[in-house]
Image: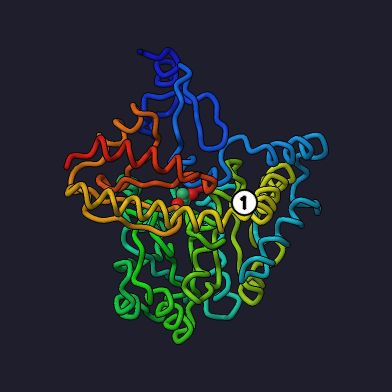
Amino acid sequence: MESATIAQANDVIAKTYKRFPLVLTRGSGCTLWDENGKRYTDFVAGIAVCNLGHAHPKIIEALAIQARTLWHVSNLFYTLPQKDLAAWLTAHSFADRVFFCNSGAEANEAAIKLARKYFNEAGQGQRYRIISMEQSFHGRTMATLSATGQEKVKLGFDPLLDGFDFVPFDDVAAIRARIGPETCAVLLEPIQGEGGVRCPAPEFLKQVRALCDETGLLLIFDEIQTGMGRTGTLFAYEQFGITPDIMTLAKALANGLPMGAMLAREQVAAAFGPGAHASTFGGTPIVSAAALEVCRVMEADGIVDHCRRVSVYFHSRLEWLKQRHAMIADVRGMGLLLGIRLSVDGEPFVLKCMEKGFLINCVQGNILRFVPPLIIREEEIDALIACLDEILDA
Ligand SMILES: *Cc1c(COP(=O)(O)O)cnc(C)c1O
């Protein structure tokens, strides 16, 4: 059925997105409904954003209370939700300080600026170059676009920001070879999400950490997609036995309200003094209150443990599927950041899933990505597997 909403939207909204012909109107838990009342199980979660699902009663309540109390005052003042959220995040990570902003790109902007400022403060202003990974994704602002290792998102925007050198992901020798007297940091996603749900070899991140220690480089982890429980620990770095110096978060931090954060250990964070960086909306009380409740619910309801348990199940079901369908080349990912690589174009299967009431997405042309809310249940996974089993050719 031709939707009037879609026709009107196509007349007035910028053409930057290739959207599915679907108008979503309501959500609850892992379920979404479209304008015709058809229901879908959500394996996209707003692209790894709605980790606690849609319309979570506790988040709604926290938000409603804060909405009646205080929305916004600017960062000229202290507020309780921002203080409590920063305290929670530092207590649960390697970091000592948090800078709040409104998106992933902004968090990475802050990280890039902090890395440069850190060496400037140390009297080594000539060190400003950052080694980034091929196939990486760090955002769409000019600096984060420049830091991104995918040509398709950079086309037509020259000149980009100078100071980024690219090496293949998962290749520590390539990083070593790229380090020069101007290098200040290594920037990477512990698991490349947009780049195709790519996990590095188990020792890679540890080796990068050792290399950064040896050469005095800062290590920046973009955990915008992998953070907040997505991979089965609160932050992905925990599973590799190391810590970064700077970490960026966004996506799931406030379960769908716009929020980004840049976290750093004290010695590094110290390079950002008063006036060094700022954001009008960053850490505003209304969004911080939602994020704080997200953190509390994750802890109180054992969400990360649930994610780990259910992901083992999901992974095994995908492996079962792979045995039955030769067109599945591999099963990949960690926690509930999972994917299957197909030997054919993935987009038609996304549409077939949609017809059958499941929302999934496709990255890099042939990788079906599954990033459901972390509260997803085995029954919902079984239903998706049955759907995939039906639509994939033998
Ligand atoms: C989504 C994403 C970003 C960009 O976040 P925005 O909020 O869209 O700016 C950056 N890095 C990674 C790893 C992401 O997944």
Judge whether residue 150 can be spotted in this image.
yes
Q: Residue at x 65, y 65 (%)?
A: 92
The answer to whether 108 appears left or right of 60 in the picture is: left
The answer to whether 328 appears left or right of 334 in the picture is: left
| Residue denoted by label 1 | 101
The quarter of the rendered structure image containing the C terminus is: top left
Q: Residue at x 75, y 35 (%)?
A: 64
Q: State whether residue 160 is above or below residue 180.
A: above
- Percent across and percent down for residue 294 are 65, 49
- Percent across and percent down for residue 245 are 55, 73
Quarter of image, res 290: top right
Judge whether residue 141 can be spotted in this image.
no
Q: State whether residue 33 is above or below residue 253.
A: above
The quarter of the rendered structure image containing the N terminus is: top left
Quarter of image, res 3: top left
Task: Tell me the SS state at disc 1.
Answer: strand
The answer to whether 198 appears left or right of 345 in the picture is: right
The answer to whether 371 appears left or right of 332 in the picture is: right
- Check disc 1 and give the amino acid type: Cys
Q: Residue furthest bottom?
A: 214
Q: Residue furthest right?
A: 69
Local packing at callout 1 (Cα closer than 10 Å; few below 14, some 14-19, many 20+) is many
- Percent across and percent down for residue 7 are 39, 16
Q: Residue at x 53, y 58 (%)?
A: 227
